[in-house]
Image: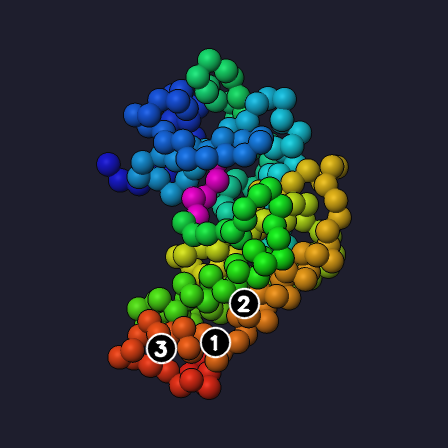
Amino acid sequence: MGKLSFREVKELASTKNLTDKTYFTPFGGGVNKKAYGINNSPWIVLSAPKSKERLIKAEIDQILSLKKNGVYTPDLGVSTTDEAIFEVQENTEKKIAFIEEKIDGFEIPRAGTAFSEDEVKKFSIQILKFIATQPTIEDAEIKRENAIKSIELLIPQIKKADVPDFQVRFDNATGKILTLDPGDPLNSENAQDKHLRWLNFWQKDLADKRYLSRLWNEQHPNNKVNSNGSSWK
């Protein structure tokens, strides 16, 4: 069976029970949502109790708005919130759900519910370490440029309006930093200054060509680059 399309995933999720492991694989979730993967599909299904509909609609609204403003986000397969939400069966309960692009990558590491400054700083270092493992300098450069571009797109957006409970995920396939899972705009602190500080941390680290060169040379002893960073654009 080939990879399932968005339409096929929605049809499956609409007609089968999400707890049926023949089709769906649970792989986490949070306070409001549960996530289900589907074999042979680049999409995931996110379900929530109907009592959380306002929060889910707010999340989708924000993702679509960010995407419209040029910020990298997971694809939702639709262009409006009303199109995104549909009903599913999860065990014995009727729930609401939406479909989101599956992003293989990593997020800011954290030990608790909130991010520490040290954990935030580790994120950009983890990105550089991943970039340094790419098979060619060209591949590494593309991912580095995409990561830098992601931050450049985010900074003016955050300056204009904070993203509640700001969370990001690095996409291993493209190198882009995607904004996802925004929080409740009616019940979240305005952490605009803090989030801009995070972006500045990451921007500074990703611009450090000397450090990237050192990481690259550790991974590629037979294909070293100049230690002064001049090999990178």
Magenta-drawn stretch contains 78: no
Q: Amino acid at mark 1?
A: Tyr
Q: Could you tell me how far apart the alpha carbons at marks 1 and 3 are, in whole angstroms? A: 10 Å
Residue 81 sits above or below residue 199 on the image: above
Q: Residue 40: percent from the left, percent from the top?
A: 30, 39
User: Would residue 61 be seen by someone viewing this image from the given angle?
Assistant: no
Query: Neighbour class for label 1 at 10 Å: few (<14), some, many (≥20)?
Result: some
Residue 211 sits above or below residue 46 on the image: below
Residue 159 sits above or below residue 57 on the image: below
Q: Earlier in the sequence, mark 3 or mark 2?
A: 2
Q: Could you tell me how far apart the alpha carbons at marks 1 and 2 are, in whole angstroms? A: 15 Å
The residue lying toward the viewer, choosing from 162 and 211, is 211
The residue lying toward the viewer, choosing from 114 and 233, is 114
The residue beneath circle 2 is 148
Q: Residue 165: percent from the left, percent from the top?
A: 65, 45
Element class at badge 2:
helix
Give the residue displayed 62% in from the left and 53% down from the top. 116
The residue beneath circle 3 is 217
For residue 211, the mark is 1
